Image (tube, helix red, strand yellow):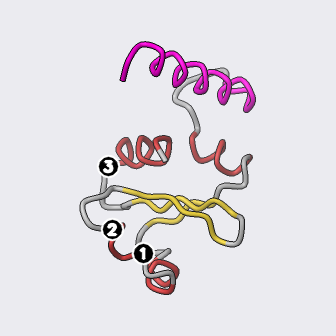
Amino acid sequence: MDYSGYQRSRDMAWELLNRHQVDRRPVKVSQICKDANIHLLDFQRGSEIIRTLDLQEELRGNDGFSTTIRATPVIFFNPACSVGRQRFTVAHE
């Protein structure tokens, strides 16, 4: 990524933190998702949805992935990962 790409990413991250009035760390990523109406499901709890939507390929080699279901964003994550990795994955998605 060139410097302008870094700047765009940085600015978007700051805008998100400001919009959700995040003023301390660690950032409560799950709260931001809740406020933004982004549903979080771990791979086990979302297994039926993953099968129904034929998203099993997304599980291979990924700690998480996102999709939209009926206009609602959904992030799936691997609960076998450490809590820190889960938080990173959800924030990344």
- Place residue 78 in its image quadrant: bottom left
Image: magenta residue range? 1-22
Q: Looking at the magenta stretch, what is its main secondary structure? A: helix
Q: In this figure, which residue is indicated by the disc labeled 1?
A: 55
Residue 43 lies, with reference to residue 64, above or below; the image says below
Sequence order check, earlier mark of 1 and 3: 1
Residue that appears at 58% across and 38% down:
28
Residue that appears at 47% across and 62% down:
76
Residue that appears at 66% across and 42% down:
32
Question: What residue type is disc 3 on?
Answer: Ser
Foreground residue among 22 and 55 = 55
Question: What residue type is disc 1 on?
Answer: Leu
Residue that appears at 46% across and 42% down:
92
Magenta stretch: residue 90 in it?
no
Q: Are marks 1 and 3 in contact (CB under 8 Å)?
A: no
Foreground residue among 75 and 9 = 9
Disc number at residue 59? Answer: 2
- Horizontally, is 70 left or right of 50 in the view? right
> In 3D space, how far apart are the residues under numbered discs 2 and 1 (Cα atoms)?
7 Å
Foreground residue among 56 and 42 = 56
Q: Are marks 2 and 1 in contact (CB under 8 Å)?
A: yes
Q: In this figure, which residue is indicated by the disc labeled 3?
A: 82
Sequence order check, earlier mark of 2 and 3: 2
- Horizontally, is 61 left or right of 25 in the view? left
Residue 21 lies, with reference to residue 38, above or below; the image says above
> In 3D space, how far apart are the residues under numbered discs 2 and 3 (Cα atoms)?
17 Å
For label 2, the SS is: helix
For label 3, the SS is: loop
